[in-house]
Amino acid sequence: MTTRGSREGRTFTRGILFGILCAASAAAQTPGLPPLVQPPTADHRVGKVIWADLVTPDLEGAKRFYGGLFGWTFRDATAGDKEFAVALLAGQPVAGLVQRSVPSGEHKQPAWLTFIAVKDTGEADRVAVAHGGKVLSPPRDYPERGRQAILADPQGAVFAVLQSGSGDPPDVLPPNGGWIWSSLITTDPNTGAAFYQALFGYEVFALPSDDGREHLLLAADGYARATANSPAVTAPNVNSHWLNFVRVAGAADACKKAVALGGRVLVQPHPDRHGEMVAVVADPLGAPFGLLEWSDARTTEVAP
Amino acid sequence: MKTLRQRWPLFLLGVLALAAVAFSPLTGCVASGGAYVGDGEYYYDAPGYVVYDGWGPTYRVGPPRDDHDHHDARHDDHHDDHHDDGHQGHPAYRPAPASRAVPSIPTQSHPPPRAPGKD
């Protein structure tokens, strides 16, 4: 009995070892989301935009476009029948690209999803709901990345909150090709600013405006984090949304490149309040994003 | 061969046990139901929202530079300690004190040291 028992034990152990090999192989083929900060820190910067995910029905096309435009490289991953890729800038994770098919017969707009830092995703959900927001996807944990949820503000703008498990990225000027700015285009900046202030504790500054529109600056930790802006035109089909900007050396050149890669220019390059150029483009599937020049030396600004 | 045939259920049990643990969401591997891209997790925006007509030099959404785009000079004439948002009534948000300069984005290439307890 003893001999038979020990043989069975060895067989079970071999099975365990074989299982480990299989699992390790599978895990190597399906890497998860990378941590935001390596090595991990305990620093949290509530209200800072710390990540962006593109939701698109054409992952390969998106990789060609953004790789060609910004020099991003990609690390593929899979999840069941869905796919995603982590975009890298100089080897550092900069964005996620998520493959999601558009159901036949539906017309949907691919878009970038903005992730904003929180210390407690569950608490953020509660505050959002208490101030007129909606929870579109409840908090979920992702190994290495942290805990995230997808919300909508009272005007319907969709965004995500992320409680990073590795701390939030430091406050530095990103290199060209990195996210530098975010703007909320909203039908009600006043109410929108109150919502985001309740959620992230923003300081809110009214910015000078000579276009008759409302522009509010949202700041945290002594840094500008975003603006909340009335739409440039009053139209019934303007939905509130977040728009993220990538730092570029030249907005005009980047626009030409975007067009050559199959994108469209939605807003031609023009000077913004910091004295350099901004533009808005759409990728080949229509997802909009901004381009923003920010040179280190320039100090001039546009006359108000 | 006989021994292997007799013990394959144990071998299979070991493989299944490890596979179940390895593919659990708790371990970090992706699996249906605990995957990064779950059904209903991501939302496409509604069509028709890409309306950027009217953007131009007078419509500015970007960040100010330090000391170059302070808040509206109208506020300097106010005797209260808050910014005026341009509304006729009180704004829905709490305006930053008028004494506060409008901040800019981080411009340093390396992170500055953070104050203790600033986590």
Image (cartoon, grey):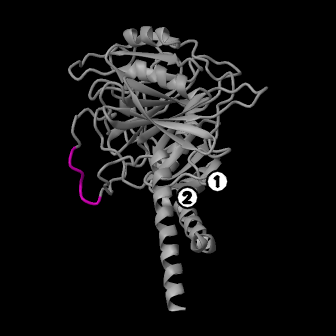
> Is residue A179 something one can see in this rendering?
yes
State how far apart marks 1 and 2 are (Cα): 11 Å
Is A86 in the magenta? no
Q: Secondary structure at mark 2?
A: loop
| Tally of numbered discs | 2
For this view, does A291 lie left or right of residue A158? left
Residue A96: image x %, image y %? 48, 36
Instruction: Categorize mark 1 by other alpha carbons within 10 Å: few (<14), some (14-19), many (20+).
Output: few
Task: Please state which amino acid type lies under the numbered disc 1.
Answer: Gly
Q: Earlier in the sequence, mark 1 or mark 2?
A: 2
Task: Please state which amino acid type lies under the numbered disc 2.
Answer: Phe
Residue A24: image x %, image y %? 45, 55
Q: Is residue A228 above or below residue A170?
A: above
Residue A53: image x %, image y %? 51, 36
Q: In the image, which residues are magenta? A: B112-117
Furthest residue to the bottom? Answer: A1
Furthest residue to the right? Answer: A105
| Quadrant of image for the C terminus of chain A | top left
Quadrant position of residue B49: top right
Numbered tag placed on residue B33 in the rendering: 1
According to the picture, the residue beneath numbered tag 2 turns out to be: B23
| Chain letter of the residue beneath label 2 in the structure image | B
| Chain letter of the residue beneath label 1 in the structure image | B
Numbered tag placed on residue A178 in the rendering: none
